[in-house]
Image (cartoon, helix red, strand yellow):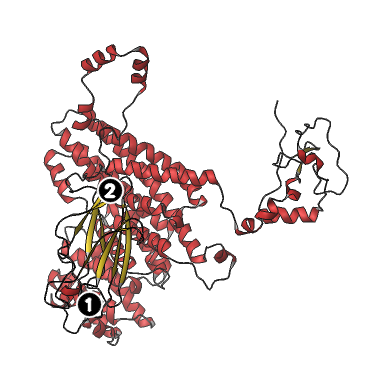
Amino acid sequence: MCIHQLNLLAASNNLPITNFLGKQHPIEAHHLSSICDIMEKAMVNGDTCIIRCILVVFQVVFKFFFSPQTERNRDIVRRSGLLLWQLLMAPRDQICSEIQKEVCLAISSGLNILYPGEAEINNLLKLVLTEGERNSGLSQLRDVILTNLAEQLQNNRFGSEDDDHYRLNDELLHYILKIVVRESCVLITKCQTVSKDDFQRLLSTVPAASSCLRYLMAVQNHLLSNTILIKPDENDDSDSSLQGETLKVQELKTSILSLATQILTGCDEVLEMLQQVTTALINSDISDREQRLKGLEQITKATMLGHLLPVLLTSLMHPNLQTLTMADALMPQLVQLVLYTSQTALLLKTQSPVFSELNSSPSGASEQKGKLLPDERMLEEKEEPGFLTGLKIPAPWAAGKTVETVHPVRDNYKFKETVHIPGARCLYLRFDNRCSSQYDYDKLVIYAGPNTNSRKVAEYGGNTLGYGSRSVLGTGWPKDLVKVEGDTVTFSFEMRSGREHNTPDKAMWGFACTVRAQESSEDVSGGLPFLVDLALGLSVLACSMLRILYNGPEITKDEETCQELLRSKLLQRCQWQGEANGVISPALTPSPSPLPLTIDEDREFTYPSDVLVPPVGHYFDLPRIRLPPGIMIKLREISGRARPQFRPSIK
């Protein structure tokens, strides 16, 4: 047990013992061979106490004291791996759960030693991912390895040497995602199949995430955070850098697109199962149906719908990921998810008391419809309640926005921030009771407007703690609400004095203020139901992606540079030609020129007999100018427009 505690201490990178152990000389091969001899003898005798101790020793040795560089060392490593694998695959009646756990920890600690090379590790992970459901030892080993990789990935910065090691390949990620989808569907299905007592116990265990789900969360957060936070390399002069794209960003976006496609596909399957279970519960006659429907939302949050999808939706709204490639690839799945979430949210909404109050009884509804005029009756029949019916949408800024300085403030510190709450008639400011500055001229000035040129409302500064000037402006920092007319307020704070020698931090704490659009926070909404919130988030993202698809490719720098050239009268008169069934037809372009020009040939062009007569306009007075084919080819290359192709009309 002492060795086990030593191993736990060594796992922390912040402790001195870690540095001490890291500096020790590697253990010799004959020492590890002796450890294997002890393990073999203990396994023959069935001595579980010695087996557990040796397993803990393996963990420490693999982590700090062994390097399989020689052939003899590699033989000992293979022998150790066979012993560990023999214990892992032993029947459950021959090995206790504690020993099985220690075996998994030992293999995970020596993963790179027992399985040198990327191919061997991938084969091991593929085995535990595909066969883990049928073997408890492999399942536990899978959980330990993925948990360890997730922790390492969370602490790892993108671009380091270990990044590729912690991020598994696409094939393994696909296996992990399949397990996550299956776990999510099983969890939702239990809301319908388990007994009442088991359902209550299930509610007490969520929303804990499984090891596979934790690893997917770590991979997703790692990719998204680095894509959003990464900055283009200013020293990179490549073409991709000139377009705002570095190779690193392109690699990240490609990985995110692949992962997002798989996650949305998996969420589609989980939502389909959720809709089936919701419908089955609504139509069932079990005694605790209402409790199960209420708990279904909590269970849903424990699945990939709660752990993966909200983060993905929020991150995809970032400008770095609002690209035409993303929109084109993800749009079909987003539309399907919007349909599933809104339909399921509406199903659950029909069971809520708020919705029932809004809809009268069938008899009352028929009587009310009988009193309506014919036009009103037709309108009434067409109306269908949506999943937002009866819900109070949380108002923006309802919970308030906190504005604050650093604590404590430092010398020459300046702070300015503007808070704007659209639609607010007035704003209410509540200051923290710790607000304090060293002198009364180290002050905060509040303006009722978007900048410091607006109307001044008040000034606050100083402290009553016996330091500095021992005075404050006016009556001191406000204890009650401060009302500011309008929907915008600006805070400007400046530290004009230098900190005195004996001034404590509390006398220079600075300030913190919460800005709300209402006088109290009692009316703050508790938020939306999870599925309603999810449906709204998916709808917003889908609309954003639709706008990107509608706008099409962004204007390139070459096009911006050539704007004046593209708008010139010279190019307005040029038309491109295309051949259809051997007959040259004029192209339909914005050009008003009645004299289309041949591009690929220098011979004179004559209109076909069926040419449309161009509309009359002042541009007929412009002289005809023929551009050489080489110039037109260059213009097409600069504009990025291909030569139009014409197809014969089908009559």
Q: Is residue 520 left or right of residue 265?
A: left
Q: Quadrant of residue 620?
A: top right
303 or 34, which lies in front? 303
Q: Residue type at mark 1: give it.
A: Ala
Query: Please, is residue 454 above or below residue 283 in the view?
Result: below
Which residue bears the numbered disc 1?
10
What residue does disc 2 label?
Answer: 303
Sequence-first disc among 1 and 2: 1
| Label 1 element class | helix
Task: Identify which residue, 546 or 583, lies in the foreground.
Answer: 546
**How many neighbours does mark 1 have within 10 angstroms: few (below 14), some (14-19), or many (20 or more)?**
many
Left or right, 559 with reference to 349? right
Q: Disc number at residue 198?
A: none
Residue in the foreground of this view, choosing between 30 and 163: 163
Front: mark 1 or 2: 2
- Which x, y percent locates residue 27? 28, 85
Whole-percent x, y for residue 171 in the image: 42, 56
Residue beneath the point at 15% across and 49% down = 204
Q: Amino acid at mark 2?
A: Thr
The picture places residue 46, in percent across and down from the top left corner, at 15, 68
Q: Residue at x 48, y 48 (%)?
A: 327
Quick check: can you spot residue 442? yes
